[in-house]
Image (cartoon, rainbow, N blue to C red):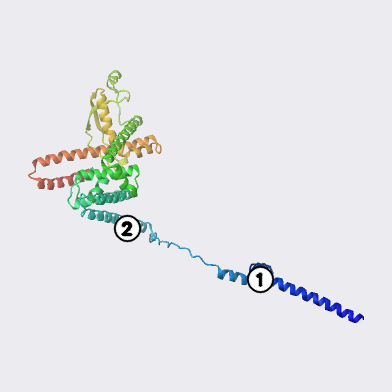
């Protein structure tokens, strides 16, 4: 009996297990596709957390199924590299700098010549092309003015005009030379106006890319008015500063005068000009009869300096107009150098600064004297010459002799 009961119980247990298995299979068959997919993903995460091989396979599948986006990359332009300058010796470095400077000047002149050739085919009605040419001319002018060797380029242009026998005035400004070289077909008035326009554009800081817009919106007439007003006010302000520097030079030079002599006080009080205490005297200088002395500038210590007598002939009474005219005349020589003069006041001692001022004024006055002498001598030669050709031939010979004697 006990054996039969055990068999029945075993059948009952097996039947329950079978029923449970069948129930699970029925539930699994009743699941939807979404539920199966969720369980599969859950099991995959659990397995991948424990097995590296499964992680690699999952990553491979993800990489294979992920679309690759390719971005557009703009190509980088190649930068033109300059050949390194030869620096073996100072002379070779100097030659390399000179060659680079000449190459740069040649390129600028080539650009100016290209603009001039383009203008030769442009009529006066084509204002757009004329404005573009003026813009390019302004770009060259701005580059040259910012360059250290700009003066040498202007000298090349002057030499070009001399070689082509094209007459230019000696006081032609630098911008006028460049404009005349490019706009050779224009009249002298138009060249002067264009030169004023590009000079004023640089003063107000107009960029090359904005030049045409600025030029057309402001109009040339308005630009010329502003430029003349600016130049006038600037020159007036610089002349005023030059007069102040000149009077300061007189105050410092009083401590080391060229010479002095006593004069009755009551007479000096009548001749002095207040408030600057200046007296103008007409003097005459005569060399003393001391032929035995000779001065050698190369060896001043071994020779005696011949002396001259300065005789005061006449005291000019105080005259405000005369004082203003003379001070203005002398101060005009300092106007081009006034910025440098004012800067050197704080950098040098008073005696050194006054000595340099004396040399500068002497050089400027001597240059003015030479220019005046050449002018009147040329007028005399022109009055006795037969024609213009004979006058030019005679003038050049005489000018060579003058320059040789003045060295």
| Quarter of the figure with the C terminus | top left
Q: Which mark is residue 398?
A: none
Q: Nearer the viewer, residue 238 or 247?
A: 238
In the rendered image, the residue lying farthest to the left is 386
Say above or below: 211 vs 326. below
**For mark 1, does the 10 Å Cα neighbourhood hold few (<14), some (14 to 19), or many (20 or more) residues?**
few
Q: Nearer the viewer, residue 240 or 296?
A: 240
Q: Nearer the viewer, residue 381 or 115?
A: 115
User: Based on the displayed image, in which of its 4 quarters is residue 293 positioned?
Assistant: top left
* Circle 2: element type: helix
Q: Is residue 168 left or right of residue 358?
A: left
Say above or below: 306 vs 401. above
Q: Nearer the viewer, residue 289 or 390?
A: 390
Q: Which mark is residue 52?
A: 1
Q: CA distance from mark 2 to mark 1?
A: 70 Å
Observer able to see residue 14: yes
What percent of the width, then of the height, locates residue 196? 27, 43
User: Based on the displayed image, in which of its 4 quarters is residue 243 positioned?
Assistant: top left
Question: From the viewer's perspective, is the residue at label 2 or at label 1 nearer?
Answer: 1
Q: Which residue matches tag 2? A: 99
């Amino acid at each position: 009996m006990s054996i039969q009961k055990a068999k029945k119980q075993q059948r009952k247990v097996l039947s329950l297990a079978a029923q449970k298995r069948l129930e699970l299979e029925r539930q699994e068959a009743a699941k939807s596709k979404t539920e199966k997919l969720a369980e599969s993903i859950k099991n995959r995460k659990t397995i991948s957390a424990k097995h590296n091989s499964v992680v690699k396979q999952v990553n491979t599948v993800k990489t294979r199924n992920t679309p690759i986006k390719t971005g557009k990359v703009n190509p980088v332009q190649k930068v033109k590299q300059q050949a390194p300058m030869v620096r073996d010796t100072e002379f070779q470095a100097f030659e390399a700098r000179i060659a680079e400077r000449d190459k740069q000047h040649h390129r600028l002149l080539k650009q100016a010549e290209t603009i001039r050739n383009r203008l030769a085919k442009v009529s006066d009605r084509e204002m757009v092309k004329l404005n573009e040419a003026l813009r390019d001319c302004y770009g060259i002018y701005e580059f040259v003015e910012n360059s250290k060797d700009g003066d040498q380029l202007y000298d090349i242009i002057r030499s070009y005009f001399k070689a082509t026998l094209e007459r230019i005035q000696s006081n032609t400004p630098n911008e006028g030379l460049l404009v005349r070289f490019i706009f050779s077909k224009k009249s002298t008035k138009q060249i002067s106006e264009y030169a004023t326009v590009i000079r004023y554009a640089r003063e107000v800081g107009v960029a090359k890319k904005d030049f045409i817009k600025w030029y057309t919106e402001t109009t040339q007439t308005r630009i010329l008015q502003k430029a003349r007003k600016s130049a006038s006010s600037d020159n007036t302000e610089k002349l005023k500063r030059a007069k102040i520097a000149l009077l300061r030079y007189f105050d410092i030079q009083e401590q080391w005068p060229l010479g002095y002599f006593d004069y009755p006080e009551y007479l000096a009080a009548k001749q002095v000009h207040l408030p600057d205490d200046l007296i103008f005297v007409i003097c005459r200088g005569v060399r003393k009869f001391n032929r035995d002395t000779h001065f050698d500038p190369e060896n001043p210590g071994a020779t005696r300096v011949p002396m001259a007598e300065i005789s005061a002939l006449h005291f000019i009474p105080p005259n405000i107009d005369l004082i203003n005219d003379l001070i203005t005349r002398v101060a005009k020589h300092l106007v081009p150098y006034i910025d440098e003069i004012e800067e050197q006041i704080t950098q040098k001692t008073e005696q050194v600064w006054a000595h340099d001022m004396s040399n500068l004024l002497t050089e400027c006055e001597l240059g003015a004297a030479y220019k005046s002498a050449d002018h009147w001598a040329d007028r005399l030669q022109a009055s006795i010459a037969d024609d213009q050709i004979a006058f030019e031939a005679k003038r050049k010979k005489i000018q060579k002799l003058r320059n040789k004697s003045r060295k």
